[in-house]
Each structure stands twice: as C-alpha cells, then as structure tokens.
Image (cartoon, helix red, strand yellow):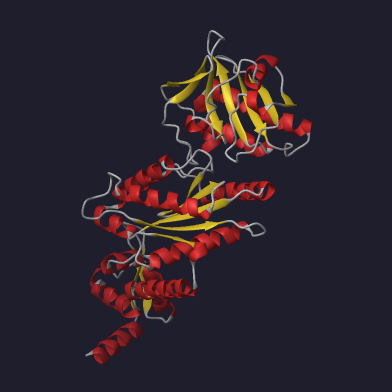
Amino acid sequence: MDAPDGARNESPRPRLLDGVIEALEPDDSAGLGLIVRDLARAVGAELALLAVLDEAGKNVGVLAAWGAAAGRDGLPTSRPADGFLDRALGLGRAVVEPIDAETAGLGEPASGEKITQALGVPVTPLRGPRGVLCAGFTRDPAHDLTTTLWVAESYARVASLCLHDGDALDGLLSGGRIDGLTGCLTQAAFLHELRREVARSERHSRPLSCSFVDLDRFKRVNDRYGHLHGSRVLASIAAVLRAGIRSEDTLGRYGGDEFVILLPDTDEVTAMQLSSRLRSTITSTMINLPHDPVDASIGVAQWRPGTSLQALLVAADEALLVAKASGGGTTARASTMTSETEEQLVAGRAGSEAAEARDAASVTDILDVSAHFAESGGASIELTAWELDVELGLVVSAWSHAINEGLLEPSGTDPASGEEMWCLSEHGRHVRERRHGQRD
C-alpha cells in the first residue's frame, strides 16, 4: 500500500537496538505512517512516532515517525534508557506529562523548538508485539487533557488494527481520498489537508509553501502513444514526486496531468529549489520515450499570515501560468512576479485561448462532416470529433450552435454504439452551399 501524501515508505524500516538505529527490510507500513502523521495534527503535536517491542520484549523498533528532524528519515538517533519512550511502553495507559527534551528519546521537531510535553498511549493488537504511540509538544496540546487522551486512544485502536491486519485498513484509508491511478490524494482530500496546514502554520507562525506541477504538452503523449501509456507516465511521475518529498509533505493530483505539493515549514526559496530538482527528475524518468520526453512547468508560492488558503492556491497557479507562458520546462515563483511577468501571463492566457480557438471545430466543419456521412445515416458528435481529429470538448460549442440554428436534424440512433445520429437539415444544406460558394 502506497502512502498517498508523499511518505517514502520504500526505504528500509529503522529499528532501535540498544539505543542505536538499525535498518530492517521494508514492509507494508504506509497505514502506520498516516496514523502517526494524523495523530500529531489532530492533537497539535510537533512530532509523533509509533514504536513496538520485539517478540522477546527487549528491543524497541520504531515503525513510523513524523515531524522529527534528527536522525535518518526523521527518526531519533538514540533512546535513553530512562527516556519517555521506554517509560510509556511500560505504563499501560495513556498519559500526557512534562518532559526533559534532552532525555525524551523522541527526537527534535523540524521547527527546531524544544519539546516540553509528551503524549504516550498503548497500542495493543490482538496478536503480535505491543507498542506505543508517542507525540511531542512544544506548547500546550490543541485540546483539553480529556479530549487529547480520547483522540490519542482512538488513533491507538486504529494502529492496533493496522498491526493486526494491514489489509483491513486499506479501504478505510483510501476510500474517497486516494486517486486510483497515481496513489496521490484526490483534490478534495488535498484541500482538507491544506486547511489543516494553514491553520497549523497560522497557530505556530511557521512558513508554508505550495507547488503546482503541470506536465507540458502531455496531450501529445496520449495522442501519439495511447492513453494506456499516458496513464503509465502519470503513475511514474507521481512516484517520482512522492520519492522526492518528505514524509510530512502532501502530494495531490489536482486534475488531469496536474499535481500539487504542500510543503509545511518551507519558505518559497526552498520550495523553489525543491521544485527545480523535481522537474529535473521528471525529465529523466525512464518511462519517457526518447523522442517525446515529458517536461513540466511548476509554479511556487508561499502562504502569508492573514491570507486564505484560496489565496495560496491562486498565487501558485498564477506562477504556474507564468512558467507555461514562457514556453514551459521551467519553474516560477509568485513573489518575483512583476508587471512584466503579469503582462506575460496575460499574453500566455491569450495565446492559449487563441490556440484552443484554432483547434476548435467550426460550424462549417460540423456541416462538412455531416454531409460526408449523409449516405451512411449522418454523424454523431463523437464521430465528428474523431473525423476532425480534435478533442470532443472542442466540438461541443459548434455542434450545439448547429443544432440550435436548425442546421442539423435527428436521423436516428446508431444500433452498434447507441449514439444519437444527426444529418443536415434542408436549412443546413442551403447554409453549407452558401458558405462554400462565398469561399470559392
């Protein structure tokens, strides 16, 4: 099961043995990563982790962690023998207590602030090793003590289920949240995460950035090699993006060939550097064909205190349009947009609209195709789009106009496809003859 928000669960799973990190083989622990991340966000913690005892009950393995800066993959580099982690494993009940950050054994938060309180709640699967969910706070939890413990115990029960049977959690985690093709969050799920991160950044005065990633000329891939290859390219690029971001970042598919990345605790300059690296990796992904390499345009923006999440998305989207208007294959940041780039943006939009207008079918095209297929019973809108070799959406406007003006009339239904067929009306034939006469 893949982590939908960018957690890199393909790396070896770390384990604490006698206070030292050791690597184990990877396993299907994406669900655990999501549980740990969401626990931290739900209670207002800066970091969280899930640790379990081995079968002998002597060694402690950290299965998932979120928000910690110290150590490889955001895991603590050591665990003091008298640290909070060991103590929480032996308590057998949920607890929130003040701690000494130096001996907690939970690691340091990415924000650089000191942990002052810790949460520990037992994880007790029906079978298998017992464990503990821990969270570290740099300030008071988001809720009162009773609510915090109730929320933590709820997450612990879900973690216990996941440890008992990971497959049982697949539907719960992915239903309605995960894009089936790419494994990224859906647009709705991404917007939900965005609201939470904006609130967190506002509460803690932390930077937050967003990157829109749009594949350049991706329609050509589908047109030349088919939608099956296009789907493989999208899935491959999603994997590239997921591998290139941190576990605390969020990756979503915003629609079609456009992805969006949410970067907590990241300013615009750093987000720009990351976006440039991601774009370079996209162009070198192995699924690209040598004569039609896929490139990307990326727009980057940083959230500003007092502004809405919509303002962040609009700023990133405007930066993306600037990158596209310059020819694509580049990145642009919202804060550097000047009046010149604004003009470039307007020109780019006008160019895109003009290009679409050139590609769109005209009423004359509709009448010509209908006349061509008159002897076979007329044409459908789908057949017209295929004949003109344009997307269906570029035929709709002219097709509707032709029907509304009485240029086409129904001629029945295609028994093979069930499509509604239309042919030229008497009025349509006269209009077509007149237009061709004027053209001659």
Viewer-nearest residue: 350 or 418: 350
Q: Position of residue 82 (x, y in %)?
A: 65, 16
Asked which quadrant contains residue 116, the reply is top right
Q: Position of residue 181 (x, y in %)?
A: 41, 44
Can residue 437 be seen in the rendering of this structure?
Answer: yes
Asked which quadrant contains residue 158, the reply is top right
Rendered position, 229 above or below 164: below
Q: Residue furthest front?
A: 102
Q: Residue furthest top?
A: 56
Left or right: residue 53 versus residue 363 is right
Rendered position, 94 above or below 56: below
Which residue is pictured at 59% across the width and 59% down the height?
Answer: 310
User: What is the quadrant of the C terminus in the image?
Assistant: bottom left
Rendered position, 406 above or below 91: below
Viewer-nearest residue: 237 or 267: 267
Which residue is pictured at 55% across the width and 20% down the height?
Answer: 164
Total residue callouts: 0
User: What is the quadrant of the N terminus in the image?
Assistant: top left
Q: Position of residue 276 (x, y in %)?
A: 40, 52
Which residue is pictured at 50% across the width and 38% down the height?
Answer: 247
Which residue is pictured at 47% across the width and 63% down the height?
Answer: 319
Left or right: residue 74 versus residue 349 is right
